[in-house]
């Protein structure tokens, strides 16, 4: 864990972000007092769950049937 001043953190921000990415925490201090920690974010990995909606979603038999004339005219702009 490395401690740096706010001035150094601003001047060399990219360097400290790379250091945090590699797994090292960087403590930022003001006047020798620790005020913040720069650390890497761990990505959230979610397991893929197949079939979660099985049996919950239904598609009507007339799903792709022709629309009645009135709504169809509205979609076609006539």
Image (spheres, rainbow, N blue to C red):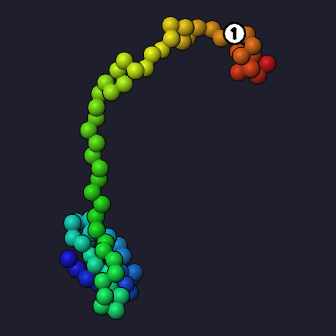
Res 50 quadrant in image: top left
Extreme-front residue of the structure: 56
| Residue 76 in sight | no
The location of residue 41, given as percent across then percent down, is 30, 60
Question: Mark 1: which secondary structure?
Answer: loop
Residue drawn at x 54%, y 12% as measured from the top left: 63
Residue drawn at x 74%, y 20% as measured from the top left: 74
Extreme-bottom residue of the structure: 31
Residue matched to label 1: 68
Extreme-right residue of the structure: 78
Location of residue 31 with respect to 19 vertically, above or below: below
Report how many numbered discs are placed on residues in the image. Answer: 1
Residue drawn at x 30%, y 74% as measured from the top left: 37
The location of residue 47, given as percent across then percent down, is 26, 38
The location of residue 69, given as percent across then percent down, is 73, 10
Location of residue 41 with respect to 75 vertically, above or below: below
Res 28 quadrant in image: bottom left
The location of residue 5, given as percent across then percent down, is 33, 86
Q: How crowded is mark 1: few (under 14 residues within 10 Å), some or many (20 or more)?
A: few
Q: Which of 11 and 28 is in front in this view?
A: 28
Location of residue 34 with respect to 70 vertically, above or below: below
Res 46 quadrant in image: top left
Looking at the rendered image, the quarter that the C terminus falls into is: top right
| Residue 69 in sight | yes
Left/right placement of residue 17 relative to residue 64 reads left
Location of residue 17 with respect to 60 vertically, above or below: below
Residue drawn at x 37%, y 25% as measured from the top left: 53
């Amino acid at each position: 864990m490395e401690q740096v001043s706010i001035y150094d953190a601003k001047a060399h921000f990219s360097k400290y972000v790379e250091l945090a990415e590699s797994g090292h925490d960087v403590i930022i201090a003001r006047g020798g007092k620790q005020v913040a920690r720069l650390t890497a974010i761990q990505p959230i990995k979610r397991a893929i769950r197949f079939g979660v909606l099985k049996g919950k979603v239904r598609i009507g038999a007339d799903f792709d049937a022709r629309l009645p004339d009135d709504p169809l005219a509205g979609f076609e702009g006539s």
